[in-house]
Every structure is written in structure tokens, then in C-alpha cells.
Image (spheres, rainbow, N blue to C red):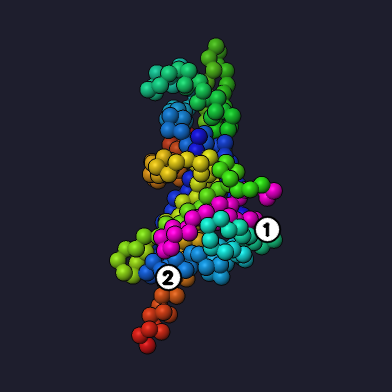
Amino acid sequence: MPGLVIDRDILIDAPVEVVWRTVTEPEQMSQWFADRVDLVVEPGARGYMSFGDQGGPVVVETVDPPTRFSFRWNHPRDEDPVVGNSMLVEFTLTPEGDERTRLRVVESGHELCGWPEAEKQRYADEHNEGWLDYLNRLAALLAGHRSG
Amino acid sequence: MTPQADDELWSAIADPSRRQVLDLIVSNGAVSASWLAGRVPFSRQAVSKHLVVLERTRLISRRKQGREVLYQVEADRLDQATRAMAELAAQWDQRLTAIKRLAEVAYAEEKKRCHP
């Protein structure tokens, strides 16, 4: 049974190479993500991200410049991040013309990480409009039911 | 780190059939398992299983009315789940917006350097 899926995207007025550097270079990452990022952007590399006085280990999964970058995090500190104990964050960069890039991020819950790629894609597609919309719709239904 | 996701809860609402059951309970108030079974394209047994999972995550609760057991949504729990999900989505939106700003500024500076 799959867990949580968050799927967001944004259109950026910059070429894909520029966006790639912003997403993957540790000194850039520390400006949009963690306070401090100790990370080598290579598949399998282990790093650490600090958020104020908190922080946690990160393991790089996919590095496919300039379109795909993913890492696992939120696994228990004394365990290796494997399928079932970590969250997978996947960035996908898609050029739209020469000077624009669509940046998509999918953070998927524990169980989903172990799925075959095709299954995962199907699931993500199905739930693309799902999660938040679904919950909001339920909340609206509930409000209507209460007042009616 | 990101707010820890409540795995059991997300798993519970990830299943389309279970969503259907939850939908019916939310739209109709307190309903029985057999009432639900009459309105979904799967077995009464499957309905019972979904009800067990939803009850375990505290999204619904049961009460007895005469000889019937009725299921109802736990509104606070549903609100809580919606807020948690919205918070996670908002967090990523903030990060994406920050990336956009950084990348666009970097690109503008790059262009200035190349074409002064």
C-alpha cells in the first residue's frame, strides 16, 4: 500500500542548465532548502542537511544532468535509507523553449519508493490532482453536510 | 526536517476503494456497513475491511444505535489530515518559488555578463 505523495511544479524563466545548478549545487541548496547542506551530488553519496538545530542525513539516488535529481531522507538516523524507511524526493526539469524550465518535485512516502518505475508513474499520475484536492473536497462535503 | 507524515493515515486514504467508502460516510453522516455495501461495487466483506482500516486511523468512529452499528466521520481528524497535507504542499511551493527566484536572478546576471 503506497504512502504519502506530494506533487508540485513551477515554471521558471531560466534555461534548464541554470535551474539544474540552482537545484543541485550545495551552496545554492542552502539558500532554498536547508540552512546548511553538506553533500556531494553523486549517486549513492551520503550527506547531511541542517535545519536550525535539527538536521538529518540524506542519500543521493539519481543524478542525471540536467533533468533528474533525487535523494532519500527522513530515514531513522541509525539505519541505512532503504525502501520502506525513507522519503524519496525527485526533481524533474523539463525545458520549455530555450529560456524556460518546468521544475517538478515529487515527494513520495515510504512504501511507494519500492515500486517498479511504471507502477509508480501510474500511481503518481492517478493521484496528481488527488491528495490535497481530495481532502479539501471531503472537508467541503463535510461542511455542507453539517450546515444542511 | 519535514513534518513526519502519518503513514498509516496516508495509506488509508491512498486506496481508491477506501476513498469511496470514506466519501459516502462523509456525504451521508452516520451509516451502517450494509447501507455502504449497497452503494459500492465491491463485497460487504471488503467494506468491512475498509471500515476497520479507517477506524484504526481514527478517520471514522462507530456507535451503536439499537441493533445497528453506525459509522461516522471524525471531523477533527479529517481537518488535521487536510492541514498536514496542505502544510507539506505549501512547504514545497515555498521551496520551488525560492528556486525560481534564485535561478531567474542567476540567469539575468549571466546574460548581463555575456551581453554587457
Q: Is residue B83 visible?
A: no
Q: In the rendered view, does A3 fall on the left or right side of A92?
A: right
Instruction: Determine crowd level at label 1: few under 14, some 14-19, many 20+ residues with C-alpha closer than 10 A.
Output: few
Task: State the residue in front, A46 or A129.
Answer: A46
Q: Which mark is residue A54?
A: 1
Which quadrant of the figure contains the N terminus of chain B? Answer: bottom right
Query: Which residue reaches farthest bottom?
Result: B116
Q: Main secondary structure of the magenta part?
A: strand
Task: Based on the picture, tell me whether residue A69 belongs to the magenta stretch.
Answer: yes
What kind of element bears circle 2? helix
Instruction: Report whether mark 1 lies on the same chain as mark 2.
Output: yes
B50 sits left or right of A85 in the view:
left
B96 versus A109 height, above or below: below
Residue named by callout 2: A18
The percent position of residue A95, horizontal first and vertical second, equals 34, 63
Element class at badge 1: strand
Tell which tag, 1 or 2, sits nearer the viewer: 2
Choose the circle earlier in sequence order: 1 or 2. 2
The residues bearing labels 1 and 2 have C-alpha atoms spaced at a distance of 30 Å
Residue shown at the point (57%, 64%) measured from the top left: A40
Say which of B16 and B60 sits in front: B16
Q: Amino acid at mark 1?
A: Gln
Spot occupied by residue B109 in the image (x, y as percentages of width and height): 43, 80
Q: Which residues are magenta?
A: A54-78
In the image, taking residue B95 as reference, residue B38 lies left or right, namely: left
Question: Which chain hosts label 1?
Answer: A
Q: Quadrant of residue A131?
A: top left
Mark 2: give few (<14), some (14-19) or many (20+) Cα within 10 Å.
Answer: many
- Res B66 → quadrant: top right
Residue pictured at 46% horizontal, 51% vertical:
A106
Chain under callout 2: A
